[in-house]
Image: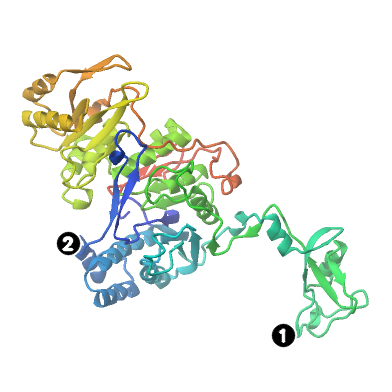
Amino acid sequence: MRSKVRDETVDLCYIDPPFNSKRTYNQIYNNVGKEDLAQEQAFVDTWTWDDHAREGLQEIISNSTGGYTVPTIELIKGLRNVLGEGNLLAYLVSMTRRIVEIYRILKPTGSFYLHCDPTSSHYLKLVVDGIFCGQKGDFRNEIIWLRSKNPKGSQFDMKRFSPFTDTILFYAKSEATVVYLDRIRIPLSPEEWADKYPCKDEHGPYADGPILRSDSMGVRPNLVYKYKGFTPGPAGWRVRREVLKEIDRKGNLAWTRTGAVRRKLRPDDIEKGQPIGSFWGDIPPINSQAQERLGWPTQKPEALLARIIEVSSNKGDLVLDAYCGCGTSVAVAERLGRSWIGMDITYQSIALILKRLEDTFGKAVAEAVVLDGVPRDMASATALAHKKDDRVRKEFEKWAVLTYSMNRATVNSKKGADGGIDGTAYFWKTKEDTDKAVFQVKSGNVGRGDVAKLKGDMERERAAVGVLITLDEATQPMRAEAKAAGLYMNAFTSQKVDRVQIVSVREIIEKGTRLSLPLTVEVLKAAVVAADVEQSDFVLEPATMVKTRKMVKASLPLGFRESKPAKRKRRA
């Protein structure tokens, strides 16, 4: 964000970051091949006090970037004294650095939503208060989302009440921040309407309500006037005479037997429903059979993001998600006609988002996305391959496998436990059975022995085809060793291919070389194709689409991605 996004250019930022849950989250693939290959590690939500955390702490307390407020610096120093230099402080230091940048890039009218859970929400609120409220920002709401109604764990083992809710902290950059709450209404059931409007006359249902001010509201001489022979006390009517006449004309005054008067309160607009409050219990989580489920472990419902984007932005505004995961925020922003930026630390996430955009909106939309931080030439591929940061150590391998397989392979991201296999793809050998290809990725010092090792790994994994992706160009002895493995004959398609294939990163980047095995089994679930309906329908029916094509943006913290159709002004 520091190097790619300018000050005060973003209208809305939503983040669903790791919660410091101390858990490992797996991406669920379509069940192909063996059961134990149906999921793979997506990300680890475990934090350690290491050099990266120490550098972050030093940046904050020294204010080396000039972006940290005095309350923020003192807060982090105080938390260090209370918590010590451990895992929790490492998490809070990381979040503080990110949120400071979010504040910088938000417009004065911008909104910020932080999705979290009770694990660290109390600390995170202090952090955001220090950053926003210390600079004329404003805490607006703590929104509670009912994400589940099913208890977790055995009822006999639980030592606490089962957590059913997530927290979304809503902050405004300034008093100029506008929220369009009337855009979202919650329809009431017939039972709820009957309970709210229990009375009925010739004009329809109504509820009994006051039309006179109570004495506790004080004396209002200007509202004391005679109407149809009735004069109220010193507190007066609740409305002016002309308004009272209009209420009466519509049949909404009721005269009691004692001569008092009451107002008939009617639904203003039954179709609109009830305004939303800070408890969101009407948006169900994504269940295992949901159409929009993509297998990402922390995927949020599109209706949840649609609500946030609808009430805090307009068409053409720029929405940013700095932990975009499987891309729910960017997919919804695309549907609702917003420009967007998405960031994530893993190419696994970016590959899933690209496929989601293509499935939902078509290939042209996915191809319009501009990638940053993803290899586009040999220099950037080499830089990614040689990164020393352990958090992205496997990203070069993920990029190589997913790009070459056109996102049809599963990746093995377990450190030191891959047995030499970095990815696996399945393809049909009959109408009912599959064969598989295994991938190994090498970033340097390759030779004939690597091909021989791949052959051995293929035998162990019972793979029909093996692919060696190498940053360096293959030598002649390597290619000879690969050719010696012979050909694979696919009985289903009658296609012959080399059992052992060698492809260079240069071929992937400069020539667009991709896996040639046909009928490769999809390991990622296809996203729902967007329908061509009105924007306002989206909240109640998530599978919809705005008719207008908007500028598309996405990114890694490895960088950011953006795209813009012709004649669109660049926004960030």
Q: Is residue 283 left or right of residue 513?
A: right
**Which amino acid type corresponds to the residue marked 2 in the rendered image?**
Asp
Q: Is residue 14 left or right of residue 311?
A: left
In this rendering, is residue 391 above or below 38? below
Residue at the spot x=35%, y=29% of the render?
Answer: 521
Res 122 quadrant in image: bottom left
Write down the residue under mark 2. 51
Sequence-first tag of 1 and 2 = 2
Within 10 angstroms of label 1, few (less than 14), some, or many (20 or more) residues? Answer: few
Between 165 and 168, the residue placed more toward the observer is 165
Q: Position of residue 472 (x, y in %)?
A: 13, 32
**Which amino acid type corresponds to the residue marked 1 in the rendered image?**
Ser
Q: Is residue 393 left or right of residue 186?
A: left
Mark 2 falls on what kind of element?
helix
Checking the image for residue 216, the label placed there is 1
Mark 1 falls on what kind of element?
helix
In this rendering, is residue 334 above or below 300? above
Q: Position of residue 407 (x, y in %)?
A: 32, 34
Between 503 and 311, the residue placed more toward the observer is 503
Q: Check whether the beta carbons of the residues at disc 1 and disc 2 lie within 8 A of each other.
A: no
Between 172 and 79, the residue placed more toward the observer is 79
Answer whether residue 338 is visible to the viewer in this image. yes
Answer whether residue 572 is visible to the viewer in this image. no
Total numbered circles: 2
Within 10 angstroms of label 2, few (less than 14), some, or many (20 or more) residues? Answer: few
Residue at the spot x=36%, y=67% of the render?
Answer: 120
Q: Position of residue 386 (x, y in %)?
A: 15, 44
Q: How is the image coloured?
A: rainbow
